[in-house]
Amino acid sequence: MIPRLLLDTNAVSDFAESEPAIMELLAEVQVLALPVVVVGEYRFGIAQARNVADYHLWLERLITQTDVLNITDETTIHYAEVRLDLKRIGRPIPMNDVWIAALCRQHELPILSRDQHFDVVPKIKRLAW
């Protein structure tokens, strides 16, 4: 059993499609966390999809069933630390993912993502499916 897990955008996408491997993994999770950055990225993606209304309804249900993590002043401290850590090792990652990593650190949560660049972020544990 996984007590809490933060979802990256690619995890949300596969969850929306009921991809079997992710559904099996998520069945073990007690509480899902959704960064507000991921909500924005997913909204951008579904705005370009064929079934906009269906995906929008699915996302709204997901939001009511998860902990949506907002960016706060405390998050900015973790953001700065993540960027400094990555700068020191010479391994930048996309800026939205820095914010997501900062939320992982702030809330001490593992991240469910296919993005292997999270593996270089110190103090972040990535799970994949």
Image (tube, rainbow, N blue to C red):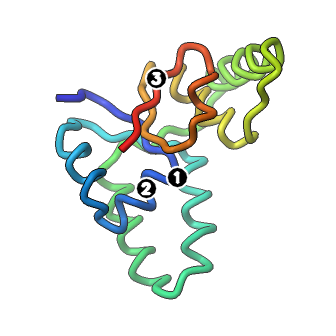
Q: Which residue is mark 2?
A: 12
Residue 9: mark? 1
- Which label is found at residue 73? none
* SS at badge 2: helix
Please tell me which residue is depicted at 40% across the width and 33% down the height of the picture: 127
Q: Is residue 101 above or below residue 129?
A: above
Distance, label 3 to label 1, CA atoms, is: 16 Å
Q: Is residue 115 above or below residue 124?
A: below
Residue shown at the point (61%, 26%) measured from the top left: 102
At label 2, which amino acid type do we have?
Val
Q: Is residue 122 above or below residue 99?
A: above
Residue contact at pointers 3 and 1, CB within 8 angstroms: no
Badge 3 element = loop
Residue 9 in the image: state x and y as whole percent: 52, 52
The amino acid type of the residue labelled 1 equals: Thr
Q: CA distance from mark 3 to mark 2?
A: 18 Å
Q: Residue at x 50, y 53 (%)?
A: 10
Where's residue 84, x and y in %?
79, 15
Of the residues under marks 3 and 1, which one precedes in the sequence?
1
Nearer to the camera, 29 or 88: 88
Name the secondary structure under disc 1.
helix
- Which quadrant of the figure contains the N terminus? top left
Residue beneath disc 3: 125
Q: Is residue 65 left or right of residue 77?
A: left
* Mark 3 neighbour class, 10 Å CA radius: few under 14, some 14 to 19, many 20 or more: some
Q: Nearer the viewer, residue 44 or 94?
A: 94
Q: Are marks 2 and 1 in contact (CB under 8 Å)?
A: yes
Q: Position of residue 85 (x, y in %)?
A: 74, 14
**What is the three-letter code of the residue carrying label 3?**
Lys
